[in-house]
Image (cartoon, grey):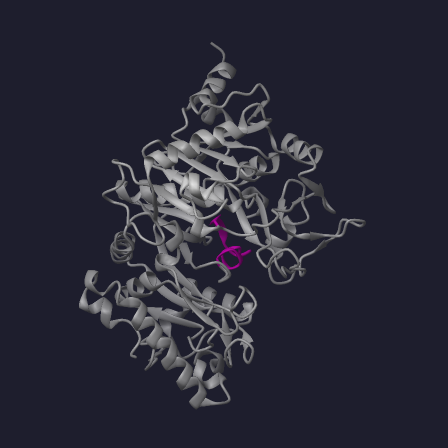
Amino acid sequence: MSIEVDRARGLEREGILSDRVQWNLPTAALFEEAVRRQEGLIAANGPLACLTGQHTGRSPNDKFLVREPSSEAVIAWGTVNRAMEPAQFDLLHRDVVTSLQGKELFVLDCFAGADPKYRLGVRIINELAWHNLFCRHLFIDEPAAAEAAAPQFTIIDAPSFKADPKRHGTNSEVVIAVNFGKKLVLIGGTSYAGEMKKSVFTVLNYILPLENVLSMHCSANAGKDGDVALFFGLSGTGKTTLSSDSDRRLIGDDEHGWSDHGIFNFEGGCYAKTIRLSAEAEPQIYATTRRFGTVLENVVVDEKTRELDLADERYTENTRAAYPISFIDNAVPSGQGGHPKNVVMLTADAFGVLPPISRLTPEAAMYHFLSGYTAKVAGTEKGVTEPKATFSTCFGAPFLPLAPSRYARMLGERIAGHSARVWLVNTGWTGGPYGVGNRMKIAHTRAMIRAALSGALDRVAYEKDPVFNLDIPTICPDVSSGVLKPRNTWTDGARYDEQAARLARMFVENFKTFEPGVTADVRAAGPNA
């Protein structure tokens, strides 16, 4: 029996019947198909530019986990992990499959997880050629190995399918439904490619901790001596930018696992924000937007010249570039590294009151990991007119099926077991809140992180911040000492005190949820409200 027939039977198991299925096409062929099908256009220097239409970001309110016997007892059910009943999922599955019958489809067999011991075989079935190209970039593409292995999880991605809330129990026409028992994900009603990436991340966040591997929403790189650093942070805090450093080797830009023998990337590519990207500040990422094969999502392209306008946000602030990690010159080919020596937690504080860098004790690390603080600023979301605190536990709440305390406990054990140094870095505002102060200079942030990773900050004195209970270095190479203490950067000290107290109260209020499950030392490591 031929491999082709085996593959076809794989689709038949899902109930999909079509003789127009393209299997594991290479980048050039998928690029060609996307252009032929008018899914996108070729921009200057060769990237493929595609638009996602109405949905330009994730739809967290439309994501569901199926309440089924194998996973029900361990899922942290609630507003993040919404339940869908098995009968609803089965009906949804039938309707999605019916919508795909006879259509031209694109199938990719790939892996998630660079460590062979923990990798997950994934089959992705796409309506759109550019979505299949996106997945080819983002996941680990080893054709021979993928063809030889049976997929352990399947994603059916059908943007043209519209869910019916009355029929399917959804909140809108968009649906992302994950069934851990059937090892199947259904995505419909949205063309935003990031839903596929984050669905696989959700699956790994369920599977790996149960195998004693910490799954993390972080980027990672390694120094010349192999010393590994992790960068946790929510969208817009600088994970991708700060981990892409010419002096260090990139392991991965967004999702990693930490096992008993080190860390490993979940992915084979990067999904970088491109809004206002510059060659000066982010040369490696900028270069990928001028390269054949890169997929640009919702980036504005001049129809005549085909030149990019990376500053134009007419479609969305959330413009993206998807590309294989091999496009980064100094990437680590294996996607693996040793145990981290440094852990950096990034926050974009729009209140302008957190220090640009501070050292965390193991207890403070768990406090800030569980808090997962950053801030939204005016203009980024409808109705946001002033800085708005956002707490996303473990810096990735939308993707965590299990209780946050499980991930935090695993991180705390690993930090202590491997004597990792932990830093809180504010990439947000200084000298005042958003609208008054200025965004932290990326050159300053890079210099502070460089000093932390090199050990230079181990040899300086520290002062305790009285409000946030953080240890602030008194000096840092290549950074003015006046920048290090945020109160000194404000012209109105009383106004700073007011804003700092306000944010401290938000931290304390948010952490009440976690207090029953942590030690007194962890509770005491937070701000003094």
Left or right: 175, with 77 as reference point:
right
477 versus 399 height, above or below: below
Q: Which residues are magenta?
A: 239-252
Q: Position of residue 437 (x, y in %)?
A: 54, 79
Along the line of sight, which residue is nearer the eye, 422 or 185? 185
Q: Residue at x 45, y 54 (%)?
A: 223
Q: Which quadrant of the structure image shows residue 469?
A: bottom left
Relative to 393, does residue 526 appear above or below in the rendering? below
- Residue lying furthest front in this view? 166
Give the image location of residue 198, x and y in percent: 45, 46
> Is 457 a magenta residue?
no
Image point 40% across, 61% down: which residue?
344
In the rendered image, which quarter contains the C terminus?
bottom left
User: For the view shown, which residue lies furthest in the top direction?
Assistant: 1
Residue at 53% across, 75% down: 434
Count the labels in the image. 0
User: As displayed, is residue 325 above or below residue 464?
Assistant: above
Residue 205 visible at all: yes
Pinpoint residue 143: horizontal percent, then vertical percent.
Answer: 51, 27
Tell me if residue 388 comes above or below residue 31 in the rendering: below
Instruction: Provide residue 396's location: percent of width, then percent of height.
Output: 39, 55
Residue 243 is a magenta residue: yes
Q: Is residue 81 left or right of residue 234?
A: left
Residue 121 can be seen in this image: no
